[in-house]
Image: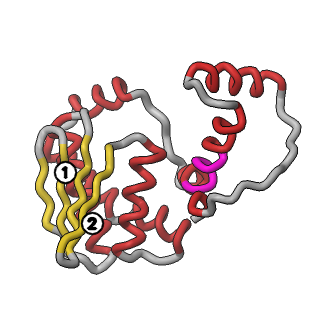
Amino acid sequence: MPGNDSKTVAKSFRVNRNALRALQEEANRQNLSVNTMVNQLLINYAEFGRYAQRAHSLNLTQKTFAEILAATSEEALITAGQNAGKSAPLAMISSKSGEVTVNTVLEYLQDLSAHANLFEFNETTEHGHWTITLLHELGNKWSIFLANYFAEAFRAAGAEPKITSSERAVTIRI
């Protein structure tokens, strides 16, 4: 994984003036150096963005996405989660890691948390079993979709997860 190598390398780039101005403004807003901001953006692209781009990923505001969820039935979200879970994660994982295993599905979950802002990822391991909790603010319908989506991804990796969901969380036990 590109982000796991913490060594930095000095490199010089030419940058569009407007892009640099935007980076400086955002770095100031976040109380970061421009160097840190650029490094975070490059890590995001290296670890996730380039794969998401190949999969034709979309960016939506949380409000827009919440409206789409509200307009969709729970039954349709179950079907959509199952159908999407049989293809989208496999394409992203295969593109990045080459094979679909429980570990690469876990890495995919971490990437979605860190880079796509779909949920907050928490993981514990006890007696050789994982408990993954995905926390979010999008309600029960999002939990329903995620539960079905990731059930299919883990099944493709040869695992049969136990998944429970609530208004704000999905818990996956493997």
Up/down of 125 relative to 164, above or below: below
Q: Earlier in the sequence, mark 1 or mark 2?
A: 2
Nearest the viewer among 141 and 166 is 166
Q: Position of residue 39 (x, y in %)?
A: 67, 44
**Residue at numbered disc 1:** 170
How many numbered markers are drawn?
Answer: 2
User: Crowding near pointer 1: few (<14 within 10 Å), some, many (20+)?
Assistant: many
Q: Is residue 173 above or below residue 14?
A: below
Is 115 included in the stretch rendered in magenta?
A: no
Q: Amino acid at mark 1?
A: Val
Q: Secondary structure at mark 2?
A: helix
Q: Position of residue 165 (x, y in %)?
A: 13, 50
User: Residue 135, labelled with which disc?
Assistant: none
Please state the horizontal and vertical placement of residue 57, each as a whole percent of the image. Answer: 50, 46
* Structural distance between the alpha carbons of marks 1 and 2: 14 Å
- Give the quadrant of the C terminus: bottom left
Left or right of 45 on screen, residue 165: left
Q: Residue at x 52, y 71 (%)?
A: 97
Residue positioned 49% across, 40% down in the render: 58
Name the residue located 21 percent from the left edge and 55 percent from the top edge: 147
Nearer-the-camera pick, 139 or 123 = 123
Label 1: element kind: strand
Percent coordinates x, y for residue 71 in the rendering: 22, 30
> Eyeballing the image, is 120 above or below 68?
below
Which residue is identified by label 2? 152
Q: Quadrant of residue 100?
A: bottom left
Of helix, strand and loop, which mostly describes the magenta segment? helix
Query: Within 10 angstroms of label 2, few (less than 14), some, or many (20 or more) residues?
Result: many
Q: Which residues are magenta?
A: 42-47
